[in-house]
């Protein structure tokens, strides 16, 4: 939903959202390089909030905000079990941001699906592909 709304708003809005997402991905990489897990978690949450806020859906934005503590615990747990998880998350975020920036909604949906599935796998909520 949020991806569709961002793409529909046109190239200027997409560029503004992309710039904000890139700043958060830079922050995530910096936190990863210094083992700043808390800083990474805050930035991860901000990355997701940017897309929801850009969609201008206050109900969804408020609901997501209410999940803050749970999300931070879940992502923190996934990074404990997989040392490369932070890098994977940033790469997945890059794919989402790039697709939103170019306005390719099918790619955005695929990148979001990949990110969600990867997160669910890292939390043990779904099995790994064989």
Image (cartoon, helix red, strand yellow):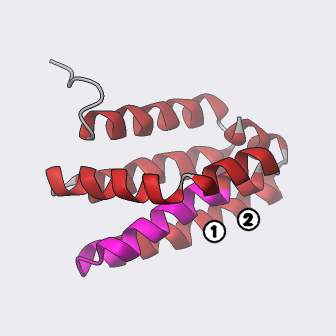
Q: Which residue is mark 1?
A: 20
Q: Residue at x 47, y 46 (%)?
A: 95
Q: Secondary structure at mark 1?
A: helix
What percent of the width, then of the height, locates residue 124?
23, 33
Q: Residue at x 39, y 76 (%)?
A: 39
Task: Report which quarter residue 38 is drawn in.
Answer: bottom left
What percent of the width, then of the height, locates residue 29?
35, 71
Q: Secondary structure at mark 2?
A: helix
Q: Which residues are magenta?
A: 30-50
Nearer to me, 51 or 66: 66
3 horizontally vs 38: left or right: right
Q: Which mark is residue 16?
A: 2
14 horizontally vs 108: left or right: right
40 horizontally vs 86: left or right: right
What percent of the width, then of the height, locates residue 88?
30, 51
Asked if the magenta segment contains residue 44, the reply would be yes
Where 71 falls versus 122 (above or below)? below
Where 102 falls versus 130 (above or below)? below
Q: Which mark is residue 109?
A: none
Image marks 2 and 1: residues in contact by CB distance under 8 Å: yes
The quadrant of the rendering that contains the N terminus is top right
Asked if the magenta segment contains residue 15, the reply would be no
Q: CA distance from mark 2 to mark 1?
A: 7 Å
Nearer to me, 110 or 63: 63
Q: Residue at x 38, y 70 (%)?
A: 40
What percent of the width, then of the height, locates residue 47?
55, 61
Task: Report which quarter residue 86 is drawn in.
Answer: bottom left
């Amino acid at each position: 939903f949020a991806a569709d709304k961002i793409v529909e708003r046109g190239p200027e809005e997409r560029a503004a959202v992309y710039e904000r997402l890139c700043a958060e991905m830079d922050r995530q990489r910096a936190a990863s390089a210094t083992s700043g897990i808390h800083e990474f978690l805050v930035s991860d949450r901000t990355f997701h909030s940017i897309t929801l806020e850009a969609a201008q859906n206050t109900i969804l934005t408020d609901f997501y905000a209410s999940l803050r503590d749970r999300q931070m615990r879940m992502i923190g747990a996934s990074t404990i079990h997989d040392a490369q998880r932070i890098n994977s998350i940033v790469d997945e975020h890059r794919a989402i941001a790039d697709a939103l920036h170019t306005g390719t909604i099918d790619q955005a949906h695929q990148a979001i699906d990949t990110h969600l599935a990867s997160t669910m796998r890292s939390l043990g909520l779904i099995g790994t592909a064989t």
